[in-house]
Amino acid sequence: MKIRVFSIEEFSVYDGPGIRTTVFLKGCPLNCNWCHSPEGKRFGNVSLRSPNRCLNCGRCIEICEYNRKKCIGCAKCVDVCPRDLIRMSAIDYEVSELVSKLLKNADILKINNGGITISGGEPLFQVDETLELVKCLKGKTHIALQTSGYGNSQKFKEIIDNIDLVLFDMKVMDEEQAKKFEGIDNSLIFKNLEILKNSKTKFIIRVPLIPGVIDTKENLKEIINKIKGAKDLVRVELLPYNKYAGSKYKLAGLKFEPMYDENMESNPHLDLFKANDIEVRVL
């Protein structure tokens, strides 16, 4: 079985406890307006071109059947760039091959109370492959899953029953606003949140503080109502808005068009979490 990866980050300290290796899987069913990893959204393996230091020699355009207006993943442009500014957005691994790669620093990760985090994109987009990866890693390292919770509920339950920690993203709570800003019906996310709350797996709720969208008191109160009293909730982690979120879009040949005011300062409203006895951290 092959699994498609767009990045592997070693010695990460923000994706779960200790020092970790984080693997980012390609493809995501959501279309979050603020996504800071556009190269991971589409499952297709397309070329990424850095505009910096480009000679504008035109070789990548000449060799492309579509003059780089459409990418079919042939990778011909990668070989002709004189400055190596073009790369493919993903690598396909056999699951067994990826496991070996991820476990190469297993001893170091264990010493530092870390492990491996499976992230994305959205790991549930490649749900069968993610489940196989989890089963191969189980018992060899601490395993965490970072997910939006949008995916097959039965497979999600099987995955979380075989791992140590879930980093569960919670974003827009209102149904219509979720369709507008994330492009999905969020009822499936809430269904899978209940499955997680009823499991025996520890979990952390992660909230990106998108100004005027997610960081409002009303939205944060709804998040708190969904999670308060959950027995295996470790804490909530709030992620301040990254004003450089749109910087990768040009690399991926996409246009960044935020439907919110990027210049607004995000507000964590820490008092709301403390009032409900929920441990909270701002990352």
Image (cartoon, grey):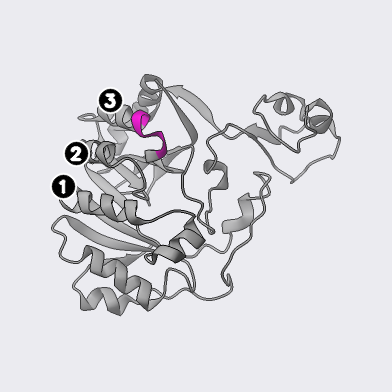
At x 47% / y 49%, what residue is drawn?
A: 30
Q: Which quadrant of the figure has residue 102?
A: top left
User: In which quadrant is the C terminus drawn?
Assistant: bottom left
The answer to which of marks 2 and 1 sits earlier in the sequence is 2
Residue range highlighted in magenta: 125-129
- Indicate the position of residue 104 as horizontal and vertical percent values: 36, 27
Q: Which residue is mark 1?
A: 199
Q: Is residue 182 visible?
A: yes
Decide: few, some or many residues near mark 1? Use Cα within 10 Å; few <14, some 14-19, many ≥20.
some
Q: Is residue 239 visible?
A: no
Residue 128 lies in the magenta stretch = yes
- Indicate the position of residue 125 as horizontal and vertical percent values: 41, 38
Horizontally, residue 222 falls left or right of residue 101, namely left
Which is nearer the eye, 156 or 133? 156
Q: Whole-Å distance between the Cαs marked 3 and 1?
A: 21 Å
The answer to which of marks 3 and 1 sits earlier in the sequence is 3
The circle on residue 250 is none
Q: Whole-Å distance between the Cαs marked 2 and 1?
A: 7 Å
Indicate the amino acid at tag 2: Asp
Decide: few, some or many residues near mark 3? Use Cα within 10 Å; few <14, some 14-19, many ≥20.
some
CB-based contact (under 8 Å), mark 2 and mark 1: yes
Which is nearer the eye, 151 or 36? 151
Q: Which residue is mark 3?
A: 136
At x 33% / y 55%, what residue is drawn?
A: 187
Our reading of the magenta stretch's main secondary structure is: helix
At x 83% / y 30%, what residue is drawn?
A: 59
Q: Nearer the viewer, mark 3 or mark 1?
A: 1
